[in-house]
Amino acid sequence: MIRVLMVDDSPLMCRILGQMLESDPGIRVWGTAGSGEEALALLQKGRPDVVTMDIHMGGMDGFETTRRIMESERPLPVVIVSSCWDPLEVEKTFDAMAAGAVAILPKPANIAEEGGEYEQEFLRTIRAASEARVGRLRKKFPDPGAPLPAAGKGRVKIVAAGASTGGPQALAAFLSGLPAGFPRPVLVVQHMAPGFTRGLADWLGKITPLRVKIGTQGEPLSGGTVYIAPEGTHMVLNRSGDSLRFSDGPPLHMVRPSVSMLFRSVAEVYGRDSAALLFSGMGADGAEELKQLRNLGAATFAQDRESSVVWGMPGEAVRLEGAEHVGPPSVLAAILSGMAAGSSNRAETTDNGERR
């Protein structure tokens, strides 16, 4: 039985979310709190399995409450349930992610229209959060020092990465570990609730040395830039590998954008001259394709169990022997930096425009 503490100053929202939780026989509402202070007082008396957290509340806000929960002796998985149209709220939401929250969901806007689909995603997120390894979030990743020696120096022409639950924290650690002059484009698929992808890009752009943006159709790829897949569309490469294109094809692994779609495209266009990484997340999106990339001779990486919030996607890649390197994000960044050293800022092309 998964026990959930709901923290929200709206009795109506607590009732709506509570009914969704109680509809699952494996989940029950452990308690409700209308403020951060009330939530912390309840946590002194008992321990639920998951906390859902509003951001803007009277008194202590959700960011500060999350931070205190994660700094306590007994941290808990926190799922942010937040409005996504308020820029200030989005900024506070990602502050809470930095403090250790494991996932983000928007508040349901219209239950009559989106109730079934929203409820399914809400319950799936709660179940994933209940398995999260939040005790590891306070641990600082080891400083890798100088870039580690690696074979194939200068061969990596493009980098692709995928993540889901717990991914924003992993991406922040990984991208912060790459140098400002990192010479290759980095393509990212992050499973993210609708309305928050722009906030993710803005947040990562403030804490990493690279330029971070949402990918756009036909835009030329540049080194030192991180391209995040837009919401609701698969992100792939064009035939020459120097720009992006997008597809509204069916979801893969029940998600769109899909890491598998991105990795397949990278394998087809760049093959062994690529690097691919899988970070924290539930499920198996991208795992088989990481193995295929390794078989082609590409550099492949997976986040380790100890630093992952949910070791689903990277764990499946490790099980399939698809990851050549396994470790915390900052160490993977150091290894990749060594591989990409000496490369130029743009994909090399022949006179007829094909990738070389």
Image (cartoon, grey):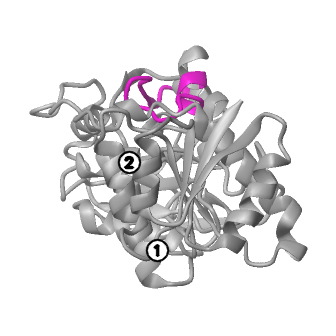
Q: Position of residue 67 (x, y in %)?
A: 32, 53
Reading the chain from its start, which is encountered first: label 2 or label 1?
1
- Image position of 21 with respect to 311: above or below: below
> Which quarter of the figure has residue 208?
bottom left
Q: Residue 61: within the magenta? A: no
In the rendered image, the quadrant that contains the N terminus is top right
- Image position of 67 with respect to 135: above or below: below
Look at the numbered disc 2 and give the secondary structure of its residue. loop
Residue drawn where x is 53% and y is 37% of the image: 271
Look at the numbered disc 1 and give the secondary structure of its residue. loop
Kindly identify which numbered label has been placed on residue 57.
1
Q: Position of residue 100 (x, y in %)?
A: 38, 48
Left or right relative to 238: residue 139: left
Range shown magenta: 296-316
> Which quarter of the figure has residue 70?
top left
Nearest the viewer among 143 and 333 is 143
Mark-to-mark CA distance, 2 and 1: 19 Å
Residue drawn where x is 55% and y is 75% of the image: 216
Amino acid marked by disc 1: Met
Q: Position of residue 163 (x, y in %)?
A: 53, 45
Left or right relative to 23: residue 36: left
| CB atoms of marks 2 and 1 within 8 Å | no
Nearest the viewer among 4 and 323 is 4
Q: Is residue 95 visible?
A: yes
Q: Residues within 10 Å of mark 1 (few under 14, many from 20)?
A: some
Amino acid marked by disc 2: Gly
Residue drawn where x is 45% and y is 38% of the image: 45
Q: Residue 307: within the magenta? A: yes
- Image position of 94 with respect to 280: above or below: below
Residue drawn where x is 46% and y is 54% of the image: 39
Q: Which residue lies under the disc numbered 2?
A: 100
Kindly identify which numbered label has been placed on residue 330.
none
